[in-house]
């Protein structure tokens, strides 16, 4: 999971402490809510932030399928993705995080498709049916490599510009695309705000309680961690789901639908490299240096954006730490009572944010 950063690219201590407290089992009270997507259409004016009183979780769990998986050659990958809605609709690309998969959008995609959007939800490298075309390609989880996968997907599907939405790895990836290729991004919905990794900032220690929340980063830095994740990825990831979203009462069937994506032959290698690279314990590849050099300057994002804070972000949920990084049309929303997997936990307000961002 990417870390929340402040305006200078430094790690937000408060959000780590929030995660740590969850590891000790504190219960997060459910709170504010969102306007229903049923009231919106692609021509609707942008709505205000979620209004108190409604149920943010309305519609969560209504669907169990995203339809058939499609495959397309995208850069170095044979990429799997789901598609719904009319082929002529405004494209929306929804990106998942770790340890999740496209089923994070199982209730969001039908809402957007019903509004006339063409919804694309890919498996990122190392997940589901997305595989490498060559056994010789480095199983690289660095941020710019994943972003370029998505650019290759756009090119393969002949999509010039799309609305992007994401959380965790998906939010980071969408923000990178918005920062480096703004002409490809009509609008952005970014859970947890500005998540572009700053390698220098990641070298700075946090308070001990905050470091505890990132136990798995250090676990993955060891060969024991690689072996443990390989053998126990189902239970490992279920633990992460529970800790990151303590108020989300997902059932075994919901988790198991996503857990199938973790059986990808490259999953462990991609996840481990991602977290080792973040801590500068593993190198990236030279062909990505030009992109990483730009990203290390913490570039501003100029496209119309809605950011979303949730309980996972702790005190950083108000968005103030990263507000200055978004210089175009902007709105921020707080989904109180919702954990890390925002689109699956709160599908209607997330879908509403996509539509509203499109019309900022």
Image: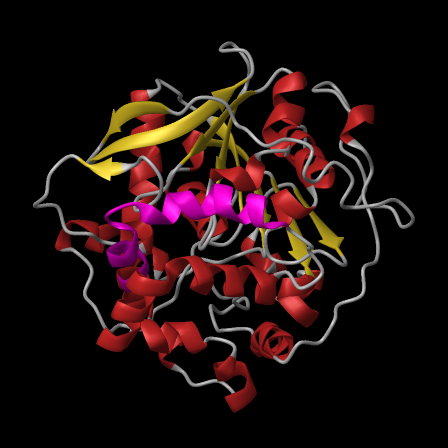
Q: Which x, y percent locates residue 224? A: 26, 76
| The residue positioned farthest toward the front in the image shown | 252
| The residue positioned farthest toward the left in the image shown | 136
345 vs 239, left or right, is: right
Query: Is 337 or 314 nearer to us in this picture?
Result: 337
User: Which residue is rendered at x = 69% and y = 71% of the image?
Assistant: 315
Query: Is 344 or 173 nearer to us in this picture?
Result: 344
Residue 258 included in the magenta stretch of the image: yes
Is 56 above or below relative to 218?
Answer: above
Numbered label tally: 0
| The residue positioned farthest toward the right in the image shown | 53
Q: Main secondary structure of the magenta part?
A: helix
Is 313 above or below relative to 292?
Answer: below
User: How was the colour assigned to the protein in this rendering?
Assistant: secondary structure
User: Which residue is rendered at x = 65% and y = 58% of the image?
Assistant: 339
349 vs 299, left or right, is: right
Rendered-image quadrant of the C terminus: top right
Occupied quadrant, residue 228: bottom left
User: Which residue is rendered at x = 45% and y = 62% of the image?
Assistant: 235
Is 168 above or below relative to 130?
Answer: below
Q: Which x, y percent locates residue 85? A: 56, 16
65 vs 356, left or right, is: left
Q: Which residues are magenta?
A: 251-272
Residue 1 visible in image? no
Residue 130 included in the magenta stretch of the image: no
Q: Which x, y percent locates residue 223? A: 22, 75
Query: Is 83 or 142 nearer to us in this picture?
Result: 83
Residue 182 visible in image? yes
């Amino acid at each position: 999971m990417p870390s929340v950063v402040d305006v200078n690219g430094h790690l937000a201590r408060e959000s780590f402490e929030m995660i740590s407290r969850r590891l000790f089992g504190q219960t997060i009270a459910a709170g504010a809510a969102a306007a229903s997507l049923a009231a919106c259409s692609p021509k609707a004016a942008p709505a205000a932030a979620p209004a108190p009183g409604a149920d943010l979780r309305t519609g969560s769990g209504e669907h169990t399928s995203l339809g058939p998986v499609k495959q397309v050659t995208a850069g170095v990958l044979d990429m799997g993705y789901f598609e719904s809605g009319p082929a002529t609709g405004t494209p929306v690309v929804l990106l998942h995080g770790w340890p999740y998969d496209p089923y994070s959008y199982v209730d969001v995609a039908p809402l957007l498709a019903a509004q006339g959007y063409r919804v694309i939800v890919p498996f990122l490298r190392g997940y589901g049916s997305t595989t490498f075309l060559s056994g010789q390609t480095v199983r690289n989880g660095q941020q710019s490599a994943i972003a370029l996968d998505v650019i290759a997907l756009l090119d393969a599907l002949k999509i010039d510009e799309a609305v992007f939405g994401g959380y965790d790895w998906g939010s980071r990836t969408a923000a990178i695309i918005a920062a480096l290729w703004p002409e490809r991004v009509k609008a952005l919905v970014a859970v947890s705000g500005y998540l572009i990794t700053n390698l220098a900032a990641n070298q700075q220690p946090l308070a001990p309680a905050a470091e505890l929340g990132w136990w798995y980063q250090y676990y993955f830095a060891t060969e024991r961690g690689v072996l443990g994740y390989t053998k126990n990825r189902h239970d490992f990831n279920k633990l992460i789901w529970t800790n990151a979203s303590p108020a989300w009462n997902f059932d075994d069937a919901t988790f198991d639908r996503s857990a199938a994506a973790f059986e990808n032959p490259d999953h462990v290698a991609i996840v481990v490299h991602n977290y080792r690279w973040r801590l500068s314990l593993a190198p990236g590849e030279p062909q990505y240096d030009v992109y990483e050099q730009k990203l290390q300057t913490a570039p501003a994002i100029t496209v119309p954006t809605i950011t979303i804070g949730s309980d996972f972000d702790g005190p950083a949920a108000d968005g103030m730490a990263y507000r200055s990084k978004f210089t175009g049309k902007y709105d921020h929303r707080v989904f109180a009572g919702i954990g890390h997997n925002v689109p699956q936990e709160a599908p209607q307000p997330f879908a509403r944010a996509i539509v509203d961002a499109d019309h900022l």
